[in-house]
Amino acid sequence: MTSGSSPDARQAAIARLERKRGFQMHLAVYLVVNTLLIGIWAVTGMNMPFWPAFPLLGWGIGIAFNGWAVYRGELSEDDIQREMTRGR
């Protein structure tokens, strides 16, 4: 452990990295699966309606919320103090 780092800060950093890695894996699976679905649609008859739009949109909404939750950042003590002074 480097000097100046606490076990709590290390655990928080590990948790953030795990959330980011989980999101990246979720995004990779989304891209692979939906690419396959579009490929199936293209091979089986492009004259049919674009049915892959349903999983693309539905799952895409989930991906967007997952990414927002992971990358929006955590609240800092400065953010909390700033909001407390605004509420007065």
Image (tube, rainbow, N blue to C red):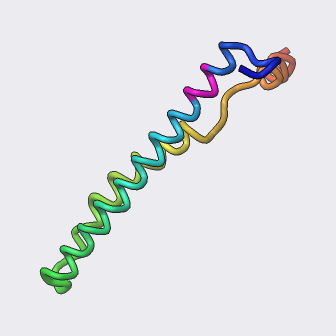
86 sits left or right of 33 in the view: right
Would you say residue 14 sits in the magenta stretch? yes
35 sits left or right of 23 in the view: left
3 sits left or right of 59 in the view: right
Point out residue 75 in the picture as x, y percentages from the top left corner. 70, 26
Q: Is residue 73 above or below residue 12?
A: below
Would you say residue 88 sits in the magenta stretch? no
Furthest residue in direction front, as rendered: 1
Point out residue 68 in the picture as x, y percentages from the top left corner. 55, 42
Q: How many marks?
A: 0
Q: What residue is at 49 percent from the left and 41 percent from the top? A: 21
State the residue in front, 2 or 75. 2
Point out residue 26 in the picture as x, y percentages from the top left corner. 39, 47
Furthest residue in direction bottom, as rendered: 47
Looking at the figure, which quarter contains the C terminus? top right
Looking at the figure, which quarter contains the N terminus? top right
Point out residue 58 in the picture as x, y percentages from the top left corner. 33, 53
Q: What residue is at 58 percent from the left and 27 percent from the top? A: 14
Furthest residue in direction left, as rendered: 44
Q: Which stretch did the figure color magenta?
A: 11-15
State the residue in front, 30 or 60. 30
Majority secondary structure in the magenta region: helix
Q: Which image quadrant is residue 74 in?
A: top right
Q: What residue is at 37 percent from the left and 61 percent from the top? A: 31
Q: Which image quadrant is residue 43 in?
A: bottom left
13 sits left or right of 48 in the view: right
Q: What residue is at 55 percent from the left and 38 percent from the top? A: 70
